[in-house]
Amino acid sequence: MSEIEIGRGKRGNRSWAFDDIAIVPSRRTRDPRDVSTKWSIDAYNFELPVLAAPMDSVVSPQTAIAIGKLGGLGVLDLEGLWTRYEDPTAALDEIAKLPADQATARMQQLYAAPIQPELIKARIKQIRAAGVTVGAALSPQRTAEFAKTVIAAGVDIFVIRGTTVSAEHVSKTQEALNLKQFIYELDVPVIVGGAATYTAALHLMRTGAAGVLVGFGGGAASTTRKVLGIHAPMATAVADVAGARRDYMDESGGRYVHVIADGGLGTSGDIVKAISCGADAVMLGSVLARATEAPGQGWHWGAEAYNPELPRGERVQVGTVGSLEQILHGPSTSADGRSNLIGALRRSMATTGYSDLKEFQRVDVVVAPYDA
Amino acid sequence: MSEIEIGRGKRGNRSWAFDDIAIVPSRRTRDPRDVSTKWSIDAYNFELPVLAAPMDSVVSPQTAIAIGKLGGLGVLDLEGLWTRYEDPTAALDEIAKLPADQATARMQQLYAAPIQPELIKARIKQIRAAGVTVGAALSPQRTAEFAKTVIAAGVDIFVIRGTTVSAEHVSKTQEALNLKQFIYELDVPVIVGGAATYTAALHLMRTGAAGVLVGFGGGAASTTRKVLGIHAPMATAVADVAGARRDYMDESGGRYVHVIADGGLGTSGDIVKAISCGADAVMLGSVLARATEAPGQGWHWGAEAYNPELPRGERVQVGTVGSLEQILHGPSTSADGRSNLIGALRRSMATTGYSDLKEFQRVDVVVAPYDA
Amino acid sequence: MSEIEIGRGKRGNRSWAFDDIAIVPSRRTRDPRDVSTKWSIDAYNFELPVLAAPMDSVVSPQTAIAIGKLGGLGVLDLEGLWTRYEDPTAALDEIAKLPADQATARMQQLYAAPIQPELIKARIKQIRAAGVTVGAALSPQRTAEFAKTVIAAGVDIFVIRGTTVSAEHVSKTQEALNLKQFIYELDVPVIVGGAATYTAALHLMRTGAAGVLVGFGGGAASTTRKVLGIHAPMATAVADVAGARRDYMDESGGRYVHVIADGGLGTSGDIVKAISCGADAVMLGSVLARATEAPGQGWHWGAEAYNPELPRGERVQVGTVGSLEQILHGPSTSADGRSNLIGALRRSMATTGYSDLKEFQRVDVVVAPYDA
Amino acid sequence: MSEIEIGRGKRGNRSWAFDDIAIVPSRRTRDPRDVSTKWSIDAYNFELPVLAAPMDSVVSPQTAIAIGKLGGLGVLDLEGLWTRYEDPTAALDEIAKLPADQATARMQQLYAAPIQPELIKARIKQIRAAGVTVGAALSPQRTAEFAKTVIAAGVDIFVIRGTTVSAEHVSKTQEALNLKQFIYELDVPVIVGGAATYTAALHLMRTGAAGVLVGFGGGAASTTRKVLGIHAPMATAVADVAGARRDYMDESGGRYVHVIADGGLGTSGDIVKAISCGADAVMLGSVLARATEAPGQGWHWGAEAYNPELPRGERVQVGTVGSLEQILHGPSTSADGRSNLIGALRRSMATTGYSDLKEFQRVDVVVAPYDA
């Protein structure tokens, strides 16, 4: 690491964002038709290394099914509107129409409705019935409370997702989730995060997680850096966690934990860069919120936006660019990296001569921050 | 330090602003309710590590009392309007209404009124009567003239604050304040600054000061860098002065001098970063000027703005975001780092696993300038 | 190279754009009238080190002739409108009038018309008849199909140009062009690219190419970085390929392969910098699209803009600044680096004391990114 | 020097602009009244280290006299309007009223009028008659032609100023000025430049010049970087030339050549930084063009703007901020670093503890580019 002395009393590592890097072709090119974008985790196989983020603007039961049929994995937020309201349509409509200066306060109210366990079951069963792999997410705070309901309802891949999730949560007043024991007792593979450093990720890997989400507060709808001062530029975060994957594989005698970039992925180019830094897959928020089918109706927000005490995110307008199919598979009629994401990934792999995702993690990159 | 050769005849250290760094969580998280933000200096204990800056847009006798009751320390500027006018309401009203092109010139006139020692006494007594800790500030130029009045009136913590305050002020024509002797003879703890380098701070610590203010010309209302070419990016300044604190503690056989970041603190994230670089507390200007109770009525300025010969600051419009209580303790209904400052600090400490401020100075930071 | 650790799992070289560097005069200056800008490749001699890029907005048969007469080399795109339409005037007019939101989709349609071999012949003969050197370009994908037609029609310099062209293209389903054998069997000199790294360029040089185009996706009309994540800042790319030229000259016993910067050349200053980094000549797009004679009529686009599946470029408005002669030879009545390009190059060489282009590659440069 | 590998074939030094650095106070402060800003070159003494740049927007015979009386040195451009027109008032009025798109072309015409030797004499005598030190400038191209006239008319300090002036100008067709012989034969001290590197400046010092102007193309009205690719960030340029001054002093057995920063000086802070990097004095353009007395009437331009073939500068609107006296000596009623320049310099010296300009060259600086 290139450690920098900030001042006599403090040092820190220089970290890089996706915008700071680019990939470069070398001596070989390849036919895009020979390229594979397949990804597998545990017993589940996917045509695309794409998870849709558990955010109400992105994943509804319907879009979870649609994304599954297109080759990815939609992850439903089990603490969002779909488990608080029998029919969240009115709430989604209202959010899409709120004036900017009232949005945060009104969303704090809308999300104050209680979570209903029977709705958790109903949503999971609806997705399961469509024949796609079922992914669903809880925050670490609510995992103990609802996990049994979720498993019983038939989730395939369980996601524990918070701004920051650590292997060791300390509390004097509340019994904290013991991640290691929880995962050990569970029958389904668990993906957990966010984490953004080598050490944090290594400890999460040791809990038995099948995958680690990399990132916190880097997304389009987040203001975590401004509010909490916390930030982890994604290129460095992914590369550091990929380093932890390698070391943990050695330490564990060969267990491969998947590294899933989660945040800062605004264009197809960012997806390419995430994999070039070592990601096995990506969790997408804003780029999928731009789908015509997206429940956010052109708006995008995460759980940070409606925290009752300390909102650390905002509802942002992302617009609509095409169907989920066009966004993932094209064809594209614009050149902004917001549609035909997988076509672009395939083309990048071909142009740099790689034929599968694991090999593509070795592509050459350059550091070139100031040339947009 | 990473010293850079600017050219054959000159070298300088690379320095970093709060915007250039971020803090990062690691392997442990903590319950925010278990976090303490207490701070003590000399015999005075505070719930919050927050001093309100001695600026007329921020601290009036009323807001000094309010801030004290909320757990911080309001520091009244004894060379501002409150000691020049029996009732400064009209002047404050006028400043809030001045057209931009007349503001500086008119403020130069308003602040030309003489300082009245009896008003110094009255203001201090008013604050004292409310039962809060009394903080009040003079510039080094006027300290000799008014200090006795201030002490007699019953100040608890005496602040000597200028753009730059040194331990050794040289003048051929005027007897300069001998800081060391002055502080030695005084009964009350003295906080002195600004200073922004290891050497300058070390010399101030040797005068016997209880605390050192770090920063000069970095505030929202300052143009010192443009006018004087003087600037000290705050992350490096705080870390350097924290280094001086450590070395001085060794040299003095254990005297702990408090490091108080003063300038460049525009959001809760900046407060978090100041402490992560080694600050014990922060002195806040613009963020408190946004309170509904703030005397500036949505405007903010410092003494630099009305210097009669060479203004080095401006009256800037900061707007109003909520009550002092909301700004300090929330709840917040916006996500811009301008309210629930202490909630955000508490959350940052919890997310990174720390339970008190002194420990939190050790949190990991990264250098990541270009990713807003 | 200054290699940087992005994170534990990834390293990359720091790379620089033309905007990041500048050239500096030293102890000697020279009379601009004593400066030569001559350039030769194979048996062809040019007064100017300038190739016009094979893009429909820049090179028509008429402008190819005009540029030839002004001392440069116009390269016609043999896969553009001129070989798809008997008379492309209507298509060019339409493109110049398309609303922004329909441009990409309509261009995808217009360029779907088939390439007609007889038009390839006709266009080349038209240019040849005017007595100038004939340059024409195909993409690597279509080179095998049309190369014989092109050679038979009498091309002087054959250009194989794609976003990325490698010496080794791998395909399971299609026989790829064997560049080395193709060039060996051809009677005319071949210029091939883009490439942007030492390794990629060295392999292209080994195919027998007379020149290598440096760059991909760096042009004014390109969004390759956003869509594919691929980018190579031009100052580093040119300097790296110039390094390959030197090493290949040694390895080959003295064969000198020309390095031609292609992309990122928006002003006369950029042309100067390309040569200062080691380019022998430059291929110009947007700056020539600003000519009154340019077929783009004030608009500029490349083949990336009308890719049927994954557009990676856009039609951009560049405006019109003067005749081709004014743009190349002046006089200029504006100071924006967009006219009198060769006068500026001559002046830069004179100011830094150099009299020919090869010597000028040694001029001193500084790295100074942030001072526009 | 921190040399950087741009690519395999090219290296360059990292260079810094005034905006990239700042000065920092240290352990001592001083009374501003004890500070001296005196400067002497040859037998001439000045209260201020300020030369007004030989540009028609800044120096007329009247403002040369005014600046002299205020303590500086006005340098008249002997190739400007004042030596081409008996009464240039109409031309100056016209320039101030030209529409933006016609400005360059019309200025090219206005400056095509021939230089009249008798006007050179008249202008110099007019300034001389007012009792101030007389400074006047020619370009190196016209120096041989007009120098005798200038000396005979009674110039005190002779300035040879071009974008780039070297000690060795090479021409096949024209006899070049032999600077060394010319200066040796002259009776008056010569200031010569611009130069921006150690080597270029060292050679200029060896010609016998009394002072060297540092900078080229860095001024507010210049586009040299865009047009010619030539640029030298000023902090590094001044520090490098100051290094040459030190080495030349050793080599020459003690001759002290003055280093005069010329370009990039837009605020009082920039003047401070120039001296902190080793400048003995500054030559000011745009900041003095903002005087109510300035002939430019709120506009500013240099000779680059009306080059007949290749303009490399523009007429820019700078506005008017106050009288020459207010700009130099204050008082100031704005905080933008554009008035009370000398008051600001004095204050910076005092704040950092220095009492004369030569000592102030040793002040501590930091490198801090990204924090405006």
Image (spheres, coloured by chain):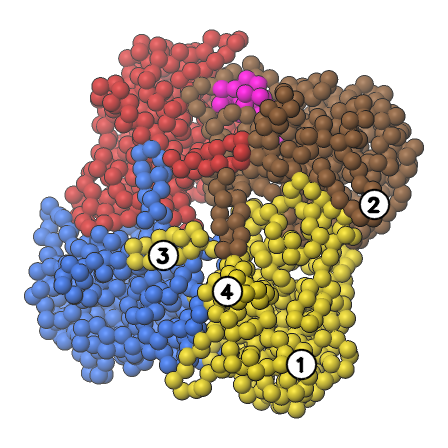
Chain colours: A brown, B yellow, C red, D blue
Question: Residue A100, how many percent across, how many down?
Answer: 74, 52
Task: Write down the residue under mark 2.
Answer: A174
Tag 3, which chain?
Answer: B
Task: Write down the residue under mark 3.
Answer: B11
Residue D284 is left or right of residue B74, and the answer is left
Frontmost residue, D213 versus A188? A188
Q: Hey, what amino acid is under mark 4?
A: Glu
User: Could you tell me how far apart the alpha carbons at marks 1 and 4 are, in whole angstroms?
Assistant: 30 Å
Task: Write down the residue under mark 1.
Answer: B155
Q: Residues within 10 Å of mark 3 (few under 14, many from 20)?
A: some
- Residue drawn 60% across and 31% down? A244
Task: Write down the residue under mark 4.
Answer: B251
Instruction: Give, as a single range, the part of the protein colored magenta.
Output: A337-360
Question: Residue D18, how many percent across, how many down?
Answer: 39, 59
* Magenta-drawn stretch contains A345: yes
Residue D207 is left or right of residue A72, and the answer is left
